[in-house]
Amino acid sequence: MADSDQELARDLGFLEAYTLGLGTMIGAGIFVLPGIVAEAAGPASMVAFAIGGVVALLAALSLSELATGMPKAGGSYYYVNHALGSFFGTIIGFGMWAGLMFATAFYMLGFGQYLLNLPSDAAGVILAGLVMSAILVGVNYRGVKETGSLQNVIVIFLVGLILVFIAVGLFAIDPDLLTPFTAAGGWPAVGATAGTVFVTFIGFEVIATSAEEIEDPGRNLPLSMIAAVVTPTILYVLVMLVSTGTLEIPTLAESDVPVADVAAAAAGNLGAATAGGYTLEFAAVGSTIMIVGAIMATISSANASILSAARVNFAMGRDEILTNWLNEIHERYRTPYRAIIATGIVILALVASPLPIDTLADVASFMFLITYALVHVAVVVLRRAEPEGYDPDFRIPSVLYPIVPILGFVACLVVMVQMGESVVTFSVGAVTLSLAPITWVQLIGLFIVLLSILWYAGYAKDRAISTTLIGEAVAPQETDVDADVYRVVVPVSNPATQRPLIKYAAASAASRPGEAELVAVNVIEVPPQTSPSQIEFEEERVERQGELLENARGVAEELDVPLRTRAIVGRSAGESLLSVLEQEHADHVLLGWDGERRRRDVLFGSTIDPLLERARCDVTLVRNPVETPGNIVMLAGSGPHASASARRAAELARAFPESSLTLLNVQSEPDDADVDPEAIGTEVISDVAADAELATDEYESRVIVTDDDVRDVLVAEATAYETVCVGATGTSTVAQALYGSIPQRIVNESDGTVLMARGDQRAPRTFRQAVIQRLER
C-alpha cells in the first residue's frame, strides 16, 4: 500500500466483530415470525430455522475467504462486482438495497403489531410503522454517535431475554402439541418456510463489510462470522420449540404478538406473587417484558438495516453504477443524507403498501439468497483465476472446497425455488391467467432483478468503472514492519504545529543507535451512520488530510530523516492510533496537545486519554511546540516517569546545540540541621540523569532550597524557561487526574513549550481484558 493511500483502522478484535454480527442477527425476526412460520410448517418450523442457519453458515465461509482476500468495505456487492463484473454487481447492488428496505418495512410492521397488539394490516399498525420509520430515517440523517453504545445495550438485553424465555419455556412444553410434527403442506412447506426465516440471518454480513477494521482477519473474521450465525440459529430453534410446544398452532398463528403470548402461557405456570396487598401475575409480567423486547428488537433491526442500505448506495455510487449525487455528505452531520432520504422514501412506501408482512420478509430473504448464490460463484471464479495478489488470510479448507461453494449455491437456489405460497394469477374479465409455478414472492424478486438489468443496460453499462480480477478487486498487501527499527509515531492534525512536532520526533529518533524511522499519521473520524470508506466523497476533509501528510514528508526531507505517512479513517481517533502503534511496533508516540480540558468526562481529550492509559510505548504530549526549544528545564523528582522526561529533554538539547538543559529540583528547608537538602536534591538529579543515561556534561544541575511552598517555587522557576519537560505523575496517568498537580499548573502558567512525558508502561490487565485476550488466542 502506498503511504498516501487511505486505510481503515483495524481496531475490531474477535469479540467486537462477533457482537457486531450478533447485534444484527438477534432482532425482530424471532419476535414476529413464530406465528407466521408455525402456521405454514407446524412444529417443524424449528427445522426451517436450522436450514436457514446452515445456508447462512455456508455463505459465511465463502464470505470469509472473499473478505480476507479483498479487505474492502462493501461486502457482497463489492466482491461480486469486482470478481464477476458490473453486470452482476448491478444485480447484487439493487438486490441488497431492495432486500434491506423490504426487511426494514417488515420490522416496522412488526413494531406496530407489538406496540398495539393488532394485525399487521390494521391502520394503526401501519401508521405506527410509518412514524417510527420516519424517526429512524431522521436519526440516521443527523448521525448520532451514541447509537452504537445503545445498540450494544439492546443486544445484551435481548440475548438475556431470549435465554430466560427459553429457560422458563422448556418447562412448559407439552409434547402432545409437537405432533404432528409437520403442517398440512408437509416437508415441502418446511423448505418454503426456510426462505421466509432467512430474513433473520441477513445481518451476519456486517462483519464482512467491516473486514478492513478487523484485527488478524484470517482468524477473527471467519470465527466471528461462524459464531454470529451458529449462536442465533441455536436460539431460534429453541424459541420455536418452546413456542410450538406451549401453544397450539392455531392459537399461535392467530396471535399478533406470538412470543408475548407464549411467554404469558409459560410464565403463567409459575402462578403469582402477593406482597403488601398487591398481586403480581407472572403471566402478565412475562408478556409485558417480551413486548418491550420485541419493540426494542424491531427498532434496532430497522435502524441497522437503514444504515446498511445507505452504505450499499454509497458502494454503487463509488463504482458509478448509481449516480454520485446520492453520495453527497451532509456538511454538518457528516452523513450520506441523500442516500438515507432515498432509502427512507422507499421504506415508507413499502410500509404503506398492501403487501402482507410475510411477503415483505420473503422478498427480503429472496434478494439476499440471490446475493449469496453469486458470492459462492465469486469464490470459485477467484480460486480458478488465481489473480496476482489474491492471497486470502482465510481459505475454505481444502477438504471442504469446492464442496462449500457448490453446496451453498445449490442450497440458495433450492430455497428460492420453494419460496412463497400464492401462485401468481391475473384475472382479465372472465379469464384467469396463471404463471404457475411462479409465486408472488418470486415474481417480485425477479422483477427487481429485471429492473436492475434494465438500469445496467440504460445507465451503468457505459459509466460503471471497469474492474478485473487482477486490478482493483485485490487489495494491496501490507508490507511487514521491521520490529528492530526504533520507530516514533507522530499524529499530525494542525498545520501550525506539525513541523516542530516532526523535528522533536526526529530528535528522539536521532538519539537512538541503529536504524530509526518516523511515521506521520492523520486520522479522519466518521460517525457510525457513515461507512469509513465513504470518506472519499468528503473532498475537503480528504484534501486537508493529504496536504497535512504531504507537508510532513516535506519536513522530513528537509531534516533528512526517513518518514512514512499513514492516512487512517476510523470511528475513534484514539482507538485508531492505538491500533497503529501496535501494528508499527512503535517505541514512542509524540503528539500535540492544546492543554485544555473541554469535557468533564475526559482529562486530556478523547484522543489522548486512550493513548496515555493503554499505549505500550513512550508517550509525549507537547503543548505549544516551537521550531527551537531554547533554554530547557527538566523537573527532576522521584515520579515514575521522571527518567522519560529527562530523556525527552536530553534529546531536544542534543538536536538543538544552541539550547541548554537544566535539571531542576526544589527542596524544603529542613527542620533538622543535620539534613543537607541541597545534597538530597543533587542526588535526586543524579539518579534521574543516570536512569535516562545522560552524561554529566549534558546538563546543568540546579537545586533550590526554600521555606515557601515547594510547588509554588517549582512552578515559578520552571515557567521562566522557554521549554519545560515534566514527567506524568501518579501510578496511573489518567486515573490520578493530573489536573491540580504540578504538570497542569505549569501548562496553565507557562507561556512557553511544555512536554509531558510518560514512559513505556505495561498496565496490569483488567479481568475483562484478560478474558478477551484468552478468547482471542
Image (tube, helix red, strand yellow):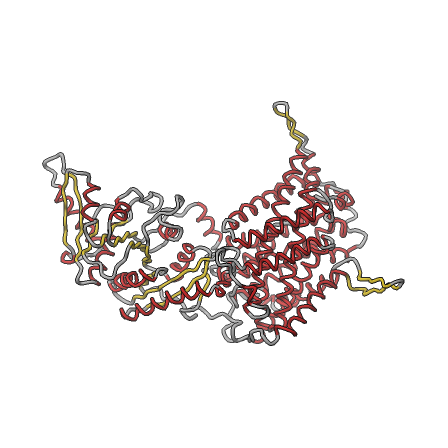
Query: Which quarter of the image is occupied by the N terminus?
Result: bottom left
Query: Residue 246 location, x and y as percent?
Result: 72, 41
Q: Is residue 370 visible?
A: yes
Compare residues 340 and 187 and report the one nearer the observer: 340
Which residue is nearer to you in this view: 752 or 507? 752
> x, y (%) of residue 609?
37, 50
Residue 238 vs 425, above or below: the answer is: above
Q: Which residue in the rendered view is the most extreme toward the top?
A: 277
Give the left or right position of residue 41, taking residue 455 as reference.
right
Judged from this view, the residue extending furthest toward the left is 673
Residue at 72% over, 66% down: 447
Query: Against 262, is 487 above or below?
Result: below
Image-quadrant location for residue 98: bottom right
Q: Is residue 456 above or below residue 714?
A: below
Q: Residue at x 55, y 51 (%)?
A: 139
Please state if 480 lies on the left or on the right of 210 as rendered: left
Residue 260 coordinates in the image, percent (x, y): 68, 41
Residue at 68% in and 35% down? 283
36, above or below 383, in the image: above
- Residue located at (27% from left, 53% from top): 755
Query: Where is residue 426, by image quadrant?
Result: bottom right
Q: Is residue 31 visible?
A: no
Residue furthest front as drawn = 331
